[in-house]
Image (tube, rainbow, N blue to C red):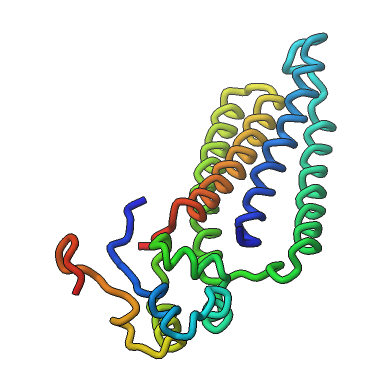
Amino acid sequence: MKPTRVTNSIRRLRFERGEMTQAELAERVGVTRQTVIAIEQGRYSPSLEMAFQIAHVLSVPLEDVFQYPNHQGDAS
Amino acid sequence: MSFEEKSAWIMGVVATGSYGVYLAIVLGMAGTMPVAEVPYVAPLLWTIGASIAASIALHILLGIFSPKEAGKKDQRDREIYRFGEYIGQSFVVIGGVAALLLAMAAVGHFWIANVIYLTFVLSAILGSVAKIVAYRRGFQPW
């Protein structure tokens, strides 16, 4: 399966939010911990709604959580 | 491993195991008579029944040993489930077409029933493998 080009900063943002655990983020978003792990590792692209929920829980705009490079290796 | 991934493992292992038992019984009897004359109906029904019972029992055990995860299903689980079922579905169609062709060729009931059973099993196995791969290697819905 084609890997996603979407990258994310969930891991960094979790640690900036008082070392929020994957389990806590998962519970607040309403998904399983395995889904948070899969998103963090780029093994799953969440829906737009789930992406917004993650951004809300981390108290940052969506673009701070997820990035999509214009060109290969150029995140913007 | 999420509850749904464990569930996919259960379905794949149970389908493989029950069909293996069925094959062992039927091929065992085939040593003494032509294979198409083997009384396959009882082993077929029993192994299907046993696989359903085993699947239910294993899911109950899974729920007992990991009660926090039991029945928890999120968007990713639902998408992977649909993806797996969609992949597995191809074998149901192949089985239907194969059975149709065998019936039109007036081939014995034994072969028609067995080709349908085999493709049901392959459908379950392929569907489970697709789900497990999606859980392990990654799943991008678009």
Quarter-of-image position of residue B102: top right
Camera-side residue: B12 or A45?
Answer: A45
Q: Going 49% across and 66% down the picture, which residue do you hit?
A: A37
Quarter-of-image position of residue B138: bottom left
Left or right? Give the position of B53 relative to A34: right
Camera-side residue: B42 or B66?
Answer: B66
Q: Going 28% across and 63% down the picture, which residue do you hit?
A: A5
Residue B109 % position (x, y): 71, 27
Q: Going 65% across and 54% down the picture, which residue do you hit?
A: B6
Q: Going 40% across and 84% down the picture, which residue do you hit?
A: A55
Q: How many marks?
A: 0
Residue A39 % position (x, y): 43, 67
B1 in relation to B36, above or below: below
A53 in relation to B48, above or below: below
Camera-side residue: A39 or A21?
Answer: A21
Residue A56 % position (x, y): 42, 88
B93 in relation to A20, above or below: above
Residue B116 % position (x, y): 64, 35
Q: Quadrant of the C terminus of chain B?
A: bottom left
Quarter-of-image position of residue B108: top right
Left or right? Give the position of A66 relative to A16: left
Q: Quadrant of the N terminus of chain B?
A: bottom right
Camera-side residue: A62 or B54?
Answer: A62
